[in-house]
Image (tube, rainbow, N blue to C red):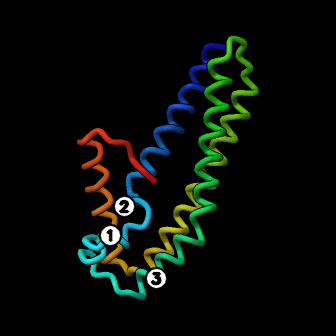
Amino acid sequence: MKYRIIIILTALVATLFISETASAQDPPPSRWWRIPKLAEQVNLTDLQKQQLDNLFESNRKNLRTLRDQVEDERLVLEDRMSSDNLNEPSVLAQLAKVSKSRTALEEATTKYFLEMRKILGAEKFRQVLEIGKLLKNSRKLKGSPDKD
């Protein structure tokens, strides 16, 4: 019994770690291409800005829904893990739901980034990822939370 609980906890921690690691390659938050300094630094054209706007609008609702779903499933898992009466099959079933919702989010996010890369090209996309990494590190140093 203790062995199975350790496995469940390990899977839970791994799931949380994977989601944090997967987000390490995010570009800057939201409509970064509408920030004049960033758009200039990447040398975006008006057409690219419009294409990025269209991409953002066509994906925003779905990505937000998927993020919310992951969070909802994760909270249910936390509740089941902290329950006084541990129901192992229920915890494992919920872990599977968390994994499935995370996979759906990762797939949608990857498709979004693929489309962004097609719009920007390889070099500009690399620049954007680097800017995103710098901004994320800057926020961590200042102690402010990441924003979507």
Q: Which mark is residue 50?
A: 3
| Residue located at (67% from left, 16% from top) | 83
Marks 1,3: beta carbons within 8 A = no
Between 126 and 61, the one nearer to me in the picture? 61
Q: Which mark is residue 35?
A: 1
On screen, residue 134 above or below 16: below
How crowded pointer 3 is (Cα within 10 Å; few <14, some 14-19, many 20+) is rated as: few
Residue mark closest to the camera, 1 vs 2: 1
From the viewer's perspective, tell me whether residue 139 is left or right of residue 74.
left
Give me the C-alpha separation between circle 1 and circle 2.
10 Å
From the viewer's perspective, tell me whether residue 31 is left or right of residue 38.
right
How crowded pointer 2 is (Cα within 10 Å; few <14, some 14-19, many 20+) is rated as: many
| Residue type at numbered disc 2 | Pro
| Residue type at numbered disc 1 | Ile
Between 61 and 134, the one nearer to me in the picture? 61
Give me the C-alpha separation between circle 3 and circle 2.
17 Å
Q: Which mark is residue 28?
A: 2
| Residue located at (25% from left, 49% from top) | 138
Give me the C-alpha separation between circle 1 and circle 3.
13 Å
Q: Residue 8: where, in percent of width, then height? A: 61, 26
On screen, residue 118 above or below 23: below
On screen, residue 81 above or below 131: above
Q: Residue 34: where, in percent of width, then height? A: 37, 72
State the quadrant of the N terminus.
Answer: top right
How crowded pointer 1 is (Cα within 10 Å; few <14, some 14-19, many 20+) is rated as: few
| Residue located at (48% from left, 44% from top) | 18
**Element at badge 2?**
loop
Give the mark nearest the N terminus, 1 or 3: 1
| Residue type at numbered disc 3 | Gln
Marks 1,2: beta carbons within 8 A = yes
**Element at badge 3?**
helix
